[in-house]
Amino acid sequence: MTPVLYRVEARHQELADTVTIRIAPIAGQLADPKPGQFEMLLAFGVGEVPISISGLGNGSGELEHTIRSVGAVTKALCTTAVGDVIGVRGPFGVGWDLDRATGHDLLIVAGGLGLAPLRPAMLEALTNRHRFGRLVLLVGARDPGSLMFVRELEQWRGRFDIDVAVTVDAAPPSWRGDVGVVTKLLSRAPVDFGNTTAVVCGPEVMMRFVAAGLADRGVPPGQILLSMERNMRCAIGHCGHCQLGPEFVCKDGPVFPWDRMEKLMLVRER
């Protein structure tokens, strides 16, 4: 697939090393992605990386990507300015199956940067609020200064049709919220666990404990959806860099149900 040219329309500095860019097609546009899918972003002369979609344009063709600067390509993408042009391929992979959650309580659990690929699912759930029972968002971060989408979090916390809880691993004396890992919030989540679909994204160890904790509380393993992001490179299952057992994360995921991931995520890496 040849990259399609997109122009950076806006950028927002989420954190010192993390930027959200809104891009729009220059000529032609890619297919509309679904929440949870990812795209390959090309920084010309530097390289290409897979980045989850953090905001959908609802048919406008505009997209948002939230990027953390961790290497040469992501650094180049994070330093793009409004008006710069990048290449985009996609969308790729399997996204959040929110149809599976229709009629259930919907529990969204995010750790750190994991809130970015969950944000489209959150926005879609709010747009179609009538489809779900209780809607609960649990967010964990290293510290208050590491929280992303702070303004939206405040807006969501002000709504009466959603429950939001935020916890941090470490906090200054001025912090009035929870302190501890996000799994500590599970017991207080106001959902009917036996009738809940959970969507989870964050560090792999966090997802493993959250999924196990939810299964212990009665959430059916097939209703616990995790977004895996392991060494994706070609995006079509050819290069094998992201292979996890029989699964190719880029092609078969990145979203998988816990009943397909449990044994694979418990294998000790060598």
Image (tube, rainbow, N blue to C red):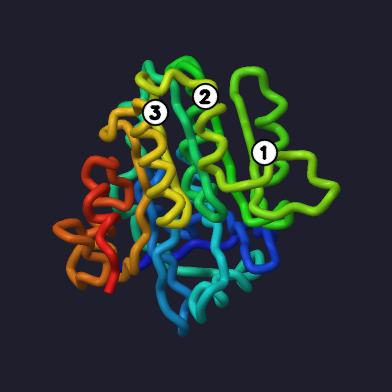
The residue furthest left is: 246
x then y, percent, for residue 153: 67, 38
Q: Name the foreground residue: 146 vs 215.
A: 215
Residue 1 shows in this picture: no
Marks 1 and 3 close (CB-CB < 8 Å): no
Q: Is residue 178 above or below residue 19?
A: above
Which residue corresponds to the image point at 56% horizontal and 35% vertical from the top-left? 185
- Which mark is in front, 3 or 2? 3
Q: Do the residues labelled 3 and 2 touch (CB within 8 Å)?
A: no
Q: Position of residue 42 (x, y in %)?
A: 43, 71
Residue type at mark 1? Leu
Labels 1 and 2 touching (C-beta < 8 A)? no
Picture quarter with the N terminus: bottom left
- Label 2 Cα neighbours within 10 Å, binned few <14 / some 14-19 / many ≥20: many
The amino acid beneath tag 3 is Arg
Which numbered circle lies on residue 135?
Answer: 2
Indicate the secondary structure of the residue bearing disc 2: strand
Left or right placement of residue 231 versus residue 27 in this view: left
Whichever of callouts 1 and 2 sits on the residue coming sooner in the sequence is 2
The mark found on residue 172 in the picture is none
List the residue tagged with mark 1.
153
Q: Choose top left, top right, bottom left or bottom right for residue 139.
A: top right
The label nearer to you, 1 versus 3, is: 3
For disc 3, the marked residue is: 217
* Disc 3 secondary structure class: loop
Q: Position of residue 216 (x, y in %)?
A: 36, 32
